[in-house]
Image: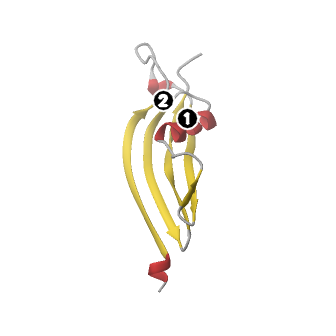
Amino acid sequence: MCVGMLAGCSTASDCTVLSSKIVRLNDFELDKADRKEAYGADVRHWFLFIPFGPQPTLKEALDRGLEQGGGDVMTDVRVKNWGWSILLYSQGGWSVKGTVVKTRK
């Protein structure tokens, strides 16, 4: 009975470098930069099959992670697209977790 009331799924991928900003890495040494672990997510809720809020996007999740880390590039990134539902309430969205680096001065 509990199996029918709770369901969820997730897909994940790993990226070496990810950014939603225009960055120049020509003269930048990524290995020597200050790093900060960060997490970002973009989530949408549903109730009675009615969505509340806009469609979640990877760009918004990444922008929130970059803002939290104070940088413009995320390295060693774990990207997830996930969703779950319990009875009449559901959530779904994107999340990113990785190391943020600031390339701009």
Residue type at the position of mark 1: Asp
Residue 95, placed above or below residue 36: below
Residue 30 x, y percent position in the rendering: 45, 25
Residue 83, placed above or below residue 25: below
Residue 79 x, y percent position in the rendering: 43, 46
- Label 2, on which residue? 20
Residue 48 x, y percent position in the rendering: 57, 66
User: Farthest residue toward the top?
Assistant: 27
Dot 1: within a 10 Å radius of its alpha carbon, few (fewer than 14), some, or many (20 or more) residues?
many
Residue 64: which quarter of the image?
top right
Q: Secondary structure at mark 2?
A: loop
Q: Considering depth in this image, is 35 or 102 the residue closer to the camera?
A: 102
Q: Are marks 1 and 2 in contact (CB under 8 Å)?
A: yes
Disc assigned to residue 63: 1
Q: Quadrant of the C terminus?
A: top right
The answer to whether residue 9 is seen in the rendering is yes
The answer to whether residue 36 is seen in the rendering is no
Residue 77 x, y percent position in the rendering: 44, 41
Residue 92, placed above or below residue 105: below
Q: Secondary structure at mark 1?
A: helix
Q: Residue at x 36, y 48 (%)?
A: 13
Looking at marks 1 and 2 on the same chain, the residue that comes earlier in the sequence is marked by: 2
Residue type at the position of mark 2: Ser
